Amino acid sequence: MLREIEAVRRFNRFYTGRIGVLPKGYLGFPFALGEARVLFELGHGGKASASELGRALELDLGYLSRVLQSLRRRGLVHARRSAHDARRTELTLTERGRRIYAELDARSREKTGAMLSPLGKEERSRLVSALGAVQSVLSNEKSGEIVLRQHRPGDLGWVIERHGALYFKEYGWGGPFEALVAEVIAGFLKNFNPARERCWIAELDGERVGSVLIVEKTRTTAQLRMLLLEPQARGRGLGKRLVAECIAFARAKGYRKLVLWTHSNLVAARQIYRDAGFRLVKREPHRHFGARVVGEYWELEL
Amino acid sequence: MLREIEAVRRFNRFYTGRIGVLPKGYLGFPFALGEARVLFELGHGGKASASELGRALELDLGYLSRVLQSLRRRGLVHARRSAHDARRTELTLTERGRRIYAELDARSREKTGAMLSPLGKEERSRLVSALGAVQSVLSNEKSGEIVLRQHRPGDLGWVIERHGALYFKEYGWGGPFEALVAEVIAGFLKNFNPARERCWIAELDGERVGSVLIVEKTRTTAQLRMLLLEPQARGRGLGKRLVAECIAFARAKGYRKLVLWTHSNLVAARQIYRDAGFRLVKREPHRHFGARVVGEYWELEL
DNA sequence: CCCGATACTTGCTTTTGTCAAGTATCTCAT
DNA sequence: ATGAGATACTTGACAAAAGCAAGTATCGGG
C-alpha cells in the first residue's frame, strides 16, 4: 500500500507539473482565474445560480458576487431573478459570453493538443486508454460507456491473458488452464468462419472488459465459449448482454441448438445461462487445472 | 486526434477535481500555499538557492524573497551565503523545518491513502500501472526501471495478444498469425518443463514490454521463440538482453545448439541474432499470414 | 405572521502576487 | 585589471484575489 501511495503521489507531482495546474493568465485574455473558472463552469453547465457556482468552484460567495458583477458589467453574463424563488439569480452566458467561452475553450484545447502532438498515434492511444483506466478505477460511477464489437488482432490473445490471470487468481487454475484456452483460441482463429462464428469484445470506456465466442460445432449446433468479464465490469448486466448477442446470432444463422461447457463453481455465469433459458444436461466431475471441479454441459434449443 | 484531446481534457477535469488541485489550507497548518510549496520543494530536494526555487515553483522572485523571509523568521529555513558565489543564498530546512515538512508530507500521504483505501488490491494495482503508463508516455525519458522475470498466469496470453496486435500493425499479418502464435504458446504451456524451458517477460516500470521463450526441441537443441519488444521499449538494448538470457540459460542446461526461426523482414531482430553469434543456415520463401515472406533459420553452436 | 434558513450583497481586511528599480556579485572579453 | 553586462537577490509601491462578517431580501413551515 505504501508503495502504491508513493507511486500515486509521484504521478500527481509529475502530472500537475506537466499540465500546469495553475493556468496562469489565460494567455492574453483579460480574465482573472476566478472569472475564467466561472465562465468555464457556465459555458460547460449551461446555467446556474450563484450559490451553485460557489459550491461547484469552492469560491467564497462574497468574492463570487464581485466576480459576477464584473462579468455582468462586461456583458458576458446575464443574471435574472428566478421566477420560482426571488432570492435566487439565474445566471447564463450572454451571446458575447458564449463567444468568449468558446475562445477560452479552444485555447485550452490547443494547449492539450500541443501536449499530445509530439506523441505518435500509438502512444496517444496508449495514453488515452491509460487515462481511461485511471478514471474508471477512481470514479465508482457505474455509468461508463459500453461498446460491444467484433474482435481485432490481439483481442483473442487478450482473452487468453485474462482467462489465465483471472482464473488463476479466483480459482488457482494455472498454466494448463491457460494452455487449454490458448488451444481453443488457436482453433477458433485458424478455422474462423465469419459467416457462422463470431467473437464479441466488450469495452467499457474504451478498455476491454469482457468477451464471448460463438463457434460452429455442427451444421445445426453452435457452442458458446470463453465468456469472461473483468471484475470491475461485473454487476451491470454485461454478461447477460453478451450471452443475448450469442443467442441472437445463433438464431439468425439458423442453428437449432446452442451448447456450452462450464464449471459448477462459476456461479455468476451459471445464473446467466439459466436466465437465458439454457438447461443443464450433464454434470461430470473431473480433475483438471490442478483442482477437483465439476464440469457442466448446458443446452438451449433455439 | 480531437477525440483524444477531449478524452485528455475530460481526464484533467476529473483528476484535478478529484485530487483537489488547490490544496487549500494545509488543514490547520498556518502556511500559505506559497510557503507550503517552498517547504515541500526544500524538503524534497534537499537544498536550493532562491532563484532555483523560483524557477521550479514558477514564483515571482520578489514574492519568493518575502516568503523566504517569513520562513526564516519562523525558524524553518536556514539561509547561508554560498561559498562559491556570494550572490547566491543556499537554502536548507532547519531541524524544525524538516519536522514541519515531515508533517505536511505525512498529511499529503494520508490524503492520497484515503483516496486509495476504498479500492481493492486489484484496483489499486490497475491504477498504479495505468498511472505509470501515462507517465511513461508523457515523459520521454528513457530511464525507466527494467525487470526481467519468468512468466506468471496471463503473461503468455499477453504474448499472444501483443504478437497479434503488433504484427498486424507493422506487417499486416492477421488472424492466422495470431492463431499460429496461440498454438505455439499452448504447446509451450501444456508441456512446460521448467528444468529445460523458460519464458522471460521484460517489464519497464512495471509494465510488460517484451518477451522471449526458450523451448526444448531435442535433448541437445533448444529453440528460441516469441522474441517481442513493444515499440516504446525498443532501442535500449533490451532485445539483446533477452537473447543473452536465452543463450546463458541454454548453455547452463547443457544444450549444444540453439536454433530459431524468423523472417527476413524483421530486421531489428535479425541484427540482434547476428550480433549474438547466430548463423543464418537456411532461407525459405513462403506465403503465410496473408503476405509473401521469407522464413529464415538461424543457429548458434553453444 | 413570525422564526430560522437560504441567496445574495457589501464593506473591510488580509493575503497573495506583480512590477520596477535597486544593490551586490560574478563572468568574460578586452 | 577593468568595465559591460549578466545573475542573484531585495525592497517599495501597488494591484488583484480572497476571506470574513454583517447586512438585506426572500422563502418555507409552523
Image: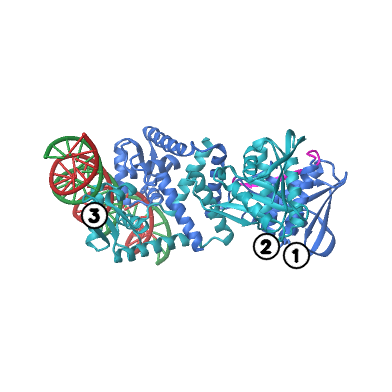
Chain colours: A cyan, B blue, C green, D red
Pick whichever, A211 or A252, lies toward us: A252
**Spatial separation of the CA atoms under disc 2 and disc 1:** 13 Å
Tell me the residue that label 2 is attached to: B170
Pick whichever, A181 or B135, lies toward us: A181
Name the residue rendered at 28%, 56% in the picture.
A91
Q: Which amino acid does the dot numbered 3 rest on? A: Ala
Name the residue rendered at 31%, 51% in the picture.
A53
Closer to the observer: label 3 or label 1?
3
Q: Which amino acid does the dot numbered 1 rest on? A: Gly
Q: Which mark is first along the chain, 1 or 2?
A: 2
In magenta stretch: residue B202 = yes
Of all chains, the one bearing label 1 is B
**Tag 3 near tag 2, CB within 8 Å:** no
Name the residue rendered at 59%, 59% in the picture.
A122
Q: Secondary structure at mark 1?
A: loop
Looking at the picture, how far across and down is residue B293, in whole percent?
Answer: 78, 65
Q: Secondary structure at mark 2?
A: helix
Of all chains, the one bearing label 2 is B
Pick whichever, C15 or A117, lies toward us: A117
Tell me the residue that label 3 is attached to: A83
Closer to the observer: label 3 or label 2?
3
Of all chains, the one bearing label 3 is A
Label 1 crowd bin: few (<14), some (14–19), many (20+), radius 10 Å:
few
Label 3 crowd bin: few (<14), some (14–19), many (20+), radius 10 Å:
few
Q: Which amino acid does the dot numbered 2 rest on? A: Glu
- Residue B44 position by quadrant: top left
Tell me the residue that label 1 is attached to: B290
Q: Which residues are magenta?
A: B193-205
